[in-house]
Structures are given as structure tokens and as C-alpha cells.
């Protein structure tokens, strides 16, 4: 009944985890879910208020413009200028997205012919792969290994693959490893893209979730980046707006026009009232972002310290709301966590073959629950 490309879609592992979780819940187990990368904190009230007000204005009830309202695109450009020092032409170098997943899922259709390669990190956000498969491209996985600080070794990509590659995905601060981009890496990416004529897609969804004074850069700050690539960004993680579905693609105008042409044919833009709320988020006070980071930082400290007290060896993440824990067998470990302690963590292989040997914890639960999880793990004698 289904097309053959459906066979290569991945959700089996995650569906299996949901099943196992439901089994435990049926038994009455109090589950601590550290699996999902979805903030437990609410959207800040001034942003919700802006939505309510805009939703009541009939002007906003029509089809939105495809690329985004000019005022939203200006707010994005203003935020990029203020936050990263990157100058964008709001008319041509900003495109509204229904969350960055929208852009990631569709961009391959604009640039990838059947059989072309897409270079994607492994472990990595699963949509890099599925977007490629929909365009009938081939994924070349770039392993992110601890000994390389979870940065792909571009020099290890076979020449033939590089020659036939159309898109290179990079994602720092990184999901799932929580790594940040080391200085000089983006310059290397620009050189590689120029050498092989590849479109760079930087996924910067976590730039604002950072700790200990770390400030994540934009790829577009790098000299030459605007000529070779774009950046996908989103309000989801920054302002706890995952359910609102709004994000942006910014950067090279020609690349954005390709993505825009695909999108014009599959969706009709973001609800104007949501764009108004997003303008409020991007242009208004940013204390809410700092407050959220403070909360995550405390949780991170409790989890990392707790795991170390259990004998685990792991770095302290500088950014994202994830902790990437080295374990022996990720499937066995996460099954044991769930069945013996009622804790959900995501097995690393869910993010690609090179995720084996790790599980991902999302610190999207209160400190008390994280402490409870550590207590349960201590009793398990891992
Ligand atoms: C959450 C996430 C996204 C997408 O989020 P949207 O809600 O679609 O904006 C993109 N990339 C990574 C790595 C993510 O973790």
C-alpha cells in the first residue's frame, strides 16, 4: 500500500520507546521523562498576550504572505544584527518558517537531485536524513566523535562523495551531543563549501540556550558564509514556543529563494497573529531567555554532578538542554533505566549509527525530578 520510501523513514525506535513507556505507566510507575527535547517552561506571558491581541484582529485572519510579514522579517533582521552583528536584507535574506523543522524538511527538494549526496552529522537531528530521503538523495553520515569534540572531520569525507554532495548540515550548539562549535570550524566549513560547491545549512536552534557566559555564534558571522549558506533558526527553544510553529531561514538570497519556491507550493505561511507574537518575542525584553538559561543551568549541574557521583565520566555541557552520557550499550542501558527506574532517556542510535555508546538526557524537568532520577539510578547500582 505504501510507497517504498516509507520503509526508510525512521520513527520505529521512538515509537518503541513510547510503547515501553506506556507499558510502565499502565503498571502505575511514576515515569520521569528526560527523553523529549521540549521545554517544560511556559511561553513568557508578554508573548502570549501579544498573540491574544493579534488573534482578535480580523486583519490577521487571512492567508499570510508566503515569505512572512515584512514586520516579522524586519524583526528577525533586527535580532540578528543585535545578537550576532550580522546584517540581513529583510526583503531577500529572511524567510519565515513554520518552525525550523519546516525548512530542514523541505530544503533538499530545492537542491538535491535523485542520487546526490547530503552530508549530515551522525548522531544528528533526524530530519536532515528524512528531508534528504524525500528528495531521493543519499545521506553521507559525518561521525561526531568525542575524541574530535563532536565536530565532523571534513577532510575524511571521500572526494567522490564531496563532489556529488549538494548540502552540508552543521548544528552547533549541537543536538544531541551538546557540543559547541570550536573556533575556526566555521571558516573550515566555508572553505570546504567553496571548494566543492556545496550549500551549507547551519541549524542554530540552540544558540540562546547557553551557560557559564558562553555565547554561541551564528555561522553567518564567518567571512564568506553569506555566499555559501543559510542558517535555520527558531523561536521554539529560545522562548519556549515549540507548539507555536514559527522560525526563520536567513542568509544567502538565492538559496532562500529556492527553499521559498518549494514552500510556496506546500504551505501557505505562518498565521499572522503568531508572527505578531514572534515580533514581540524578538524585539521585546530578553530577560525571559536569561531566566530560562538559569533554570536549565541549575538542572544541568544537578544532573552532571549526580551522574559523576555514580561513576560516569562526562563533560559539562556549555549549551543546549541536553546531557550526552557515554554508556556501554545504549539500547540496553535505556531499557534498563526505563524498566528498573522508570526513567526515560533517548538511546543514542536513535540519532544515527555514531550515537551508539551514548544516551541523551533532556533537562526539561524540574530539579526535584532530576534529583529523584539520580536517587533511583543510585539504587539501581548501574
Ligand atoms: C528542536 C530542533 C529543531 C526544530 O525546532 P522547530 O520547533 O521546528 O523550530 C531543529 N533542529 C534541532 C537540532 C532541534 O533540536
Image: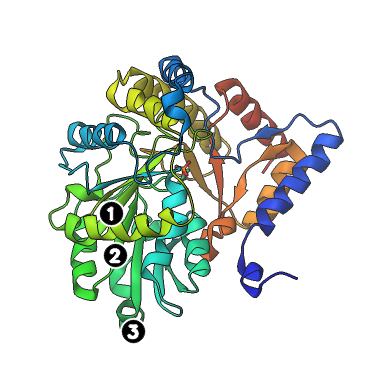
Proximity of marks 3 and 2: CB atoms separated by less than 8 Å: no
Where residue 358 appears, as percent x and y from the top left, is 55, 53
Identify the residue position indicated by label 2 in the image: 199
Query: Would you say 47 lies left or right of 186 here?
Result: right
Asked whether the residues under the numbered discs 1 and 2 touch, taking CB atoms below 8 Å apart as contact, a structural biologist would say: yes
The residue sitting at 18% across, 35% down in the picture is 81
Residue neighbourhood size for the residue with mark 3, other residues' Cα within 10 Å, grouped as few (<14), some (14–19), many (≥20): few
Disc 2 residue crowd, few under 14, some 14–19, many 20+, Cα 10 Å: many
Which residue bears the numbered disc 3? 160
Could you tell me which quadrant the C terminus lies in?
A: top right
Q: Check mark 2 vs ligand 1: CB closer than 8 Å? yes or no.
A: no
Provide the secondary structure element on which disc 2 rests.
strand
C-alpha distance separating marks 3 and 2: 17 Å
Which image quadrant for residue 281?
top left
Q: Quadrant of residue 70?
A: top left
At 33% from the left edge and 57% from the top edge, which residue is drawn? 201
Residue corresponding to mark 1: 230
For the residues marked 1 and 2, what is the alpha-carbon distance in whole angstroms? 8 Å
Residue 218 position, x and y percent, is 25, 45
Q: Are marks 1 and 3 in contact (CB under 8 Å)?
A: no
Amino acid at each position: 500500500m505504501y510507497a517504498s520510501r516509507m520503509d526508510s523513514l525512521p520513527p520505529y525506535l521512538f515509537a518503541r520507546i513510547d510503547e515501553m513507556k506506556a507499558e510502565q505507566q499502565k503498571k502505575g510507575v511514576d515515569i520521569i521523562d528526560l527523553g523529549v527535547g521540549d521545554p517544560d517552561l511556559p511561553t513568557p506571558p508578554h508573548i502570549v498576550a501579544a498573540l491574544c491581541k493579534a488573534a482578535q484582529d480580523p486583519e490577521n485572519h487571512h492567508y499570510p504572505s508566503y515569505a512572512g510579514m515584512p514586520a516579522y522579517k524586519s524583526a528577525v533582521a533586527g535580532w540578528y544584527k543585535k545578537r550576532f552583528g550580522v546584517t540581513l536584507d529583510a526583503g531577500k535574506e529572511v524567510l519565515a518558517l513554520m518552525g525550523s523543522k519546516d525548512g530542514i524538511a523541505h530544503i533538499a527538494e530545492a537542491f538535491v537531485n535523485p542520487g546526490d549526496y547530503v552530508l549530515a552529522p551522525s548522531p544528528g537531528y533526524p530530519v536532515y536524513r528524512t528531508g534528504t530521503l524525500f528528495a531521493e538523495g543519499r545521506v553521507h553520515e559525518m561521525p561526531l566523535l568525542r575524541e574530535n569534540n563532536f565536530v565532523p572531520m571534513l577532510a575524511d569525507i571521500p572526494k567522490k562523495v564531496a563532489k556529488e554532495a549538494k548540502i552540508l548540515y552543521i548544528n552547533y550548539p549541537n543536538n544531541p551531543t551538546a557540543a559547541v562549535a570550536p573556533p575556526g570550524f566555521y571558516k573550515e566549513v566555508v572553505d570546504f563549501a567553496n571548494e566543492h560547491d556545496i550549500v551549507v545549512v547551519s541549524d542554530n536552534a540552540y544558540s540562546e540556550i547557553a551557560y557559564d557566559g558562553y555565547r554561541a555564534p551564528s555561522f553567518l558571522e564567518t567571512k564568506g558564509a553569506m555566499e555559501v549558506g543559510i542558517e535555520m533558526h527558531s523561536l521554539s527553544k529560545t522562548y519556549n514556543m515549540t507548539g507555536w510553529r514559527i522560525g526563520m531561514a536567513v542568509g544567502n538570497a538565492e538559496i532562500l529563494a529556492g527553499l521559498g519556491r518549494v514552500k510556496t507550493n506546500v504551505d501557505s505561511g505562518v498565521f499572522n497573529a503568531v508572527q505578531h507574537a514572534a515580533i514581540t518575542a524578538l524585539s521585546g525584553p530578553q530577560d525571559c531567555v536569561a531566566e530560562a538559561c538559569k533554570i536549565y543551568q541549575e538542572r544541568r549541574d544537578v544532573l552532571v554532578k549526580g551522574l559523576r557521583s555514580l561513576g560516569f565520566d562526562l563533560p559539562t555541557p556549555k549549551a543546549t538542554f541536553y546531557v550526552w552520557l557515554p554508556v556501554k550499550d545504549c539500547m540496553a542501558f535505556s531499557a534498563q533505566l526505563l524498566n528498573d527506574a522508570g526513567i526515560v532517556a533517548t538511546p543514542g542510535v536513535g540519532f544515527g549509527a555514531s550515537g551508539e555508546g551514548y544516551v541523551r538526557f533532556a533537562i526539561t524537568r524540574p530539579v526535584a525530578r532530576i534529583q529523584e532520577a539520580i536517587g533511583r539510578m543510585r539504587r539501581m547500582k548501574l
